[in-house]
């Protein structure tokens, strides 16, 4: 249907933004590429390796630009950190620790009650949320991954963890006042922040106490987090070995405040600690340290523009289209496909309890 509708009319613009749900990316992306649109594609590219390949092939065959929304590459913080690493400030990178603090309420909103709670209607958690991070680590380290292992699961948000006396909905619940995942406590205070759109916009279009309460009474976001149909993990660790023996560890966990990622980079001549706002460089030669403050003008969440990454990506994409200089886009379609394959390999490692050797075809086993 998409292909027929697109082919029936002449192109309306130079670019198209694909921001449908994850499983619905491939058809519009392929059809629009064939019509000559340059593509700005939300992550993940698609929910199967075959569909990702279809998108990349279509863009290459049509000769159009394809930018996947790996916004973490485009933040002022990431650009500064990458420049320090590439400039040899801490010598050779030997290992990296990277944390994605999803946030307790964000996990409940998006991955327990929300659109990304089930693998069969979306995709697994590592792909839906953290393909950003495995892509970012590859970008920062600048080497391909050779081996990966992973552990994790769904610990908290399941029926076995349901408190005694809990009801199916927060508004009916005798223990709601003491529950960290109380829907009224998460959503009602957002009415006092008129400039903040997300996540309340997902819950209801009626921005009033009556509208929110009605949505929590009837809609999915008022359900008890222990009585939902979710199945994606709420914590996961990934261990990575890059070419040349460089290693990295990645942790995704729901059980944090919602905040910027935190990273520690360990090199032969120094180390770096970063939290999305500032970068601390420790020098092993003189024993000193330098704190570099990075001004992004944006917060960590989607509503805040992902630390300036959203605007940075759009600016780079527009510049690439306007000038024809593809280098403004920090990852090609093929590079994005490779890091998606890494995510599939990591998830296969988690499910199988194995160490997976990563190559161009390793991701298809999930």
Image (spheres, rainbow, N blue to C red):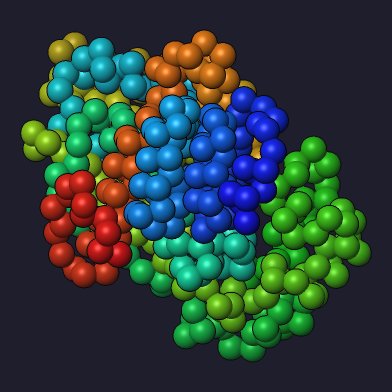
Camera-side residue of 44 and 190: 44
Q: Quadrant of residue 7?
A: top right
Taking the view exactly as shown, the residue that stands out farthest to the left is 244
Along the line of sight, which residue is nearer the eye, 182 or 129?
A: 129
Left or right of 361 on screen, residue 112? right
Left or right: 365, with 304 as reference point: left
Residue found 31% across the figure and 30% down from its top? 139
Residue furthest front as drawn: 8
The answer to which of 216 and 145 lies nearer the viewer is 145
Q: Is residue 109 visible?
A: yes
Name the residue at 52% across, 73% down: 230
Place of residue 32 in the rendered image (x, y in percent of width and height, measured from the top left): 57, 39
Give the residue drawn at x 52%, y 11%: 323
Q: Classify 100 as above or below 266.
A: below
Write down the quadrant of residue 167 in the picture: bottom right
Q: Quadrant of the N terminus?
A: bottom right
Q: Is residue 55 above or below residue 74?
A: below
Which residue is more in the foreground, 17 or 63? 63
Residue 102 visible from this viewpoint: no
* Image x and y of residue 20, in percent: 61, 50
Q: How many marks?
A: 0
Q: Quadrant of the C terminus?
A: bottom left
Q: Quadrant of residue 364?
A: bottom left
């Amino acid at each position: 249907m998409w292909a027929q509708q697109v082919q029936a009319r002449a192109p309306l613009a130079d670019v198209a933004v694909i921001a449908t749900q994850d499983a619905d990316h491939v058809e519009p992306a392929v059809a629009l590429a064939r019509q000559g649109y340059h593509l700005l594609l939300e992550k993940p590219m698609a929910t199967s390796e075959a569909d990702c390949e279809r998108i990349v092939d279509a863009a290459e065959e049509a000769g159009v630009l394809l930018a996947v929304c790996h916004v973490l590459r485009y933040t002022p913080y990431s650009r500064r950190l990458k420049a320090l690493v590439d400039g040899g400030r801490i010598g050779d990178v030997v290992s990296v620790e990277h944390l994605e603090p999803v946030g307790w309420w964000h996990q409940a909103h998006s991955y327990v009650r929300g659109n990304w709670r089930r693998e069969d209607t979306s995709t697994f958690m590592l792909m839906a949320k953290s393909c950003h991070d495995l892509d970012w680590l590859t970008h920062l380290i600048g080497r391909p991954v050779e081996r990966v292992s992973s552990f994790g699961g769904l610990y908290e948000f399941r029926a076995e963890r349901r408190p005694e006396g809990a009801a199916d909905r927060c508004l009916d619940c005798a223990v709601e006042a003491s529950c960290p995942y109380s829907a009224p406590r998460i959503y009602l205070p957002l009415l006092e922040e008129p400039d903040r759109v997300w996540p309340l916009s997902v819950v209801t279009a009626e921005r009033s106490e009556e509208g929110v309460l009605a949505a929590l009474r009837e809609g999915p976001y008022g359900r008890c987090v222990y009585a939902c149909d979710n199945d994606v993990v709420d914590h996961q660790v990934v261990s990575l070995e890059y070419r040349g023996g460089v290693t990295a560890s990645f942790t995704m966990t729901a059980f944090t405040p919602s905040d910027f990622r935190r990273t520690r980079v360990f090199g032969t001549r120094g180390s770096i600690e970063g939290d999305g706002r500032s970068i601390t460089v420790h020098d092993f030669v003189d024993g000193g340290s330098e704190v570099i403050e990075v001004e992004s003008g944006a917060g960590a969440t989607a509503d805040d523009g992902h630390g300036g990454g959203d605007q940075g990506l759009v600016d780079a994409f527009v510049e690439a289209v306007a000038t024809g200089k593809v280098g403004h886009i920090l990852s090609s379609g093929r590079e994005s496909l490779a890091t998606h394959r890494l995510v599939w390999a990591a998830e296969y490692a988690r499910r199988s309890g194995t160490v997976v050797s990563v190559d161009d075809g390793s991701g298809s086993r999930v």
